[in-house]
Amino acid sequence: MRTAIPIKERDLPRKVIDIILLVFFFINIIFICYLFDIEQLIVSGEDHTVNWETFTYPIWPPKFIVNLNHFVGQFDKALLYRDPWWRATIWIDVVLFGPFYIAAIIAFIRGCNWIRIPSIMWATIMLTNVTIILITEFTDPKYAGGKPLPIIGANLLWILIPILIIIRMALYPQTFSGERFQFKKEETSD
């Protein structure tokens, strides 16, 4: 039995889900981890109160990313203040999730079944992080004044995609080879 089935040879349901996941992984590795997240580690939370006309921008990320993050921070106070708990979630993104996205892109394109467990681990950690972020943002008075709809909207993909990964891995235990998991009805005897 083959252990690797390239994306072009997969059945349609798996192919569609995997393409959605690949787009998400590419967006995260190209834009999120090493542009937006890096900015949140390089530029401190105190920098939101500085005079932007005299602010010295870092070499990386580009100036427009710094400005965009601080613009979004008007709606999302935790992103603006960057407290230690927030920065811890960002470090997890940069150190763990960045390499995962690269490995996942390769594995999902080639059809390598070893990505199943790392995918489930990523999904559970991501759901945990986003849950902590949302609960803190909506219950801590320090972040009062944040806008709930933009905050939920900004985090929605990082809730839905991990759920999709968990469902994808549960439905296809062999990940890229093998059949879809079938729920069997119990026969009742009368």
Image: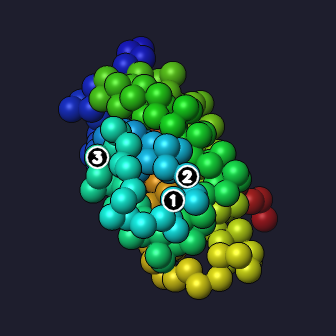
Residue at figure coordinates x 42%, y 17% from the top left: 3
Residue at figure coordinates x 29%, y 46% from the top left: 62
Q: Is residue 130 left or right of residue 84?
A: left
Query: Considering the numbered disc 3 on the image, is that residue within a helix, a strand or a loop?
Result: loop
Q: CA distance from mark 3 to mark 2?
A: 16 Å
Quick one: label 3, few (<14), some, or many (20+) residues within 10 Å? Answer: few
Dividing the picture into quadrants, the one containing residue 30 is top left
Q: Residue furthest right?
A: 190
Residue at figure coordinates x 59%, y 85% from the top left: 145
Q: Are marks 2 and 1 in contact (CB under 8 Å)?
A: yes
Q: Are marks 3 and 1 in contact (CB under 8 Å)?
A: no
Dividing the picture into quadrants, the one containing residue 142 is bottom right
Q: Amino acid at mark 2?
A: Ser
Q: Is residue 63 visible?
A: yes
Q: CA distance from mark 2 to mark 1?
A: 5 Å
Quick one: label 1, few (<14), some, or many (20+) residues within 10 Å? Answer: some
Residue at figure coordinates x 73%, y 80% from the top left: 141
On the image, numbered disc 1 is attached to which residue?
Answer: 47
Q: CA distance from mark 3 to mark 1?
A: 16 Å
Q: Position of residue 108 (x, y in %)?
A: 36, 31
Quick one: label 2, few (<14), some, or many (20+) residues within 10 Å? Answer: some
Query: Considering the numbered disc 1 on the image, is that residue within a helix, a strand or a loop?
Result: helix
Q: Amino acid at mark 1?
A: Asp
On the image, numbered disc 3 is attached to which residue?
Answer: 62
Query: Considering the numbered disc 2 on the image, is that residue within a helix, a strand or a loop?
Result: loop
Q: Amino acid at mark 3?
A: Pro
Q: Residue furthest left?
A: 8
Q: Of circles 3 and 1, which is in front?
A: 1
Q: Which mark is residue 44?
A: 2
